[in-house]
Amino acid sequence: MKAGIAAAIALFGITISSAALADWNTTTQDDIFSGGKKAMLLGFVSPAQSVAFDCDSESLSLALLQKEKWPEGRNSSAWKLLIKVDKGEIHRFTAESAKRNNDYAQYVTFEKDEILKVLADLREAKSVVQLGLQSDEFDSKWSGTVSVGGSTRETDKFIQACKLK
């Protein structure tokens, strides 16, 4: 009996710690306007950066989020956003910089067909997601990675909530 209790406690601990360490998370809520759902799939790059997929009944977007205040009067600019899952193809997007909220700026794209390809790759991810952001205007490049921990489960939740199947 003690061995069974110990095994159950160990299994519970592994389950809880695995969920706490997941690098991907999906949140859903009811959409008052459509009667459907709104959802966001987040992949954590660092404490200051995440990759976000958002959907509602009318749109699907992909954005790299950066923790920073958007200065008053700042203009949006065009950027190249690159995503590669494992050793797959590099998905290339034209993204626009913008204020997301009071705490985050974003580099966002609405290129649905290519976003759907990235989501399909995420469902099958085995090792790492690479991200790149580039601006010719500012002669700037940034790259980062996201672990794939929880990506299959959370991408499935997102796809179901967004009715993308």
Image: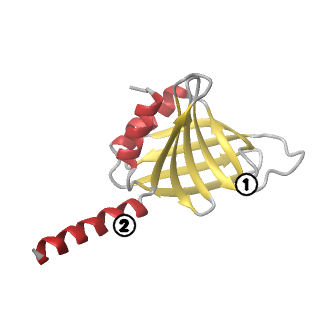
What whole-number distance in Å separates the C-alpha atoms at marks 2 and 1? 28 Å
- Residue 103: image tag: 1
Up-down relation of residue 34 to residue 44 (above or below): above
**In-front residue for pair 96/13:** 13
Quadrant showing the C terminus: top left
Q: Residues within 10 Å of mark 1 (few under 14, many from 20)?
A: few
Residue farthest along the left direction in this orientation: 1
Up-down relation of residue 9 to residue 15 (above or below): below
In contact (CB < 8 Å): disc 2 and disc 1: no
Residue at coordinates 70% horizontally, 46% vertically from top-left? 135
Residue at coordinates 35% horizontally, 45% vertically from top-left? 153
Element at label 2: helix
Residue 15 lies left or right of residue 161; in this view the side is left
Residue at coordinates 35% horizontally, 64% vertically from top-left? 16
Residue under circle 2? Answer: 17
| Residue type at the position of mark 2 | Ser
Could you tell me residue 49's position as x and y percent? 61, 57
Could you tell me residue 58's position as x and y percent? 58, 23
| Residue type at the position of mark 1 | Asp
Quadrant showing the N terminus: bottom left
The picture quadrant where one finds residue 12 is bottom left
Could you tell me residue 27's position as x and y percent? 50, 44
Q: Residues within 10 Å of mark 2 (few under 14, many from 20)?
A: few
- Is label 2 or label 1 in front? 2
Residue farthest along the front direction in this orientation: 1
